[in-house]
Image: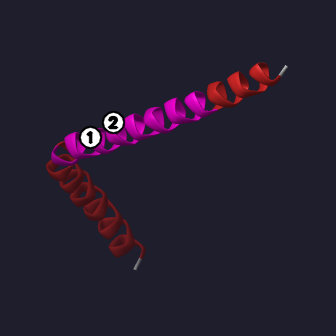
């Protein structure tokens, strides 16, 4: 029983490594694009927040 376990573990590790090497590179460009798009989205959101804060600060300064 122990011998079968180790054989299965080794075979599964080899198979998993091969599948990871086979499919891994094709996923990377997609993941990179997702991360880049998320970064652009966060940048646009931050820029909008800064503009709003500046406008509010300008309004407060004009009141004084």
Front one among 40 and 61 = 61
The verdict on residue 11 being magenta is no
Image point (39%, 42%), residue name: 38
Residue 3 drawn above or below residue 30: below
Q: What element carries label 2?
A: helix
Q: In which quarter of the image is the C terminus?
A: top right
Front one among 17 and 59 = 59
Horizontally, is 10 left or right of 59 in the view? Answer: left
Residue 27 drawn above or below residue 10: above
Horizontally, is 45 left or right of 24 in the view? Answer: right
List the residue tagged with mark 1. Answer: 33
- Name the chief secondary structure element in magenta: helix
Image point (53%, 33%), residue name: 46
Front one among 17 and 39 = 39
Q: What stretch is highlighted in magenta?
A: 26-52
Q: Where is residue 42 in the image (x, y as percent from the top left)?
A: 47, 38
Image point (24%, 55%), residue name: 14
Q: How crowded is mark 1: few (under 14 residues within 10 Å), some or many (20 or more)?
A: few
Dots 1, 2 in contact, CB < 8 A: yes
Q: How crowded is mark 2: few (under 14 residues within 10 Å), some or many (20 or more)?
A: few
Q: Residue reaching furthest bottom?
A: 1
Q: Where is residue 52 in the image (x, y as percent from the top left)?
A: 60, 33
List the residue tagged with mark 2. Answer: 36
């Amino acid at each position: 029983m122990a011998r079968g376990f180790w054989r299965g573990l080794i075979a599964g590790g080899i198979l998993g490594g091969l599948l990871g090497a086979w499919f891994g590179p094709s996923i990377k460009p997609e993941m990179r694009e997702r991360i880049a798009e998320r970064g652009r989205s966060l940048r646009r959101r931050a820029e909008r927040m800064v503009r709003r804060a500046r406008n509010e600060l300008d309004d407060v300064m004009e009141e004084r």
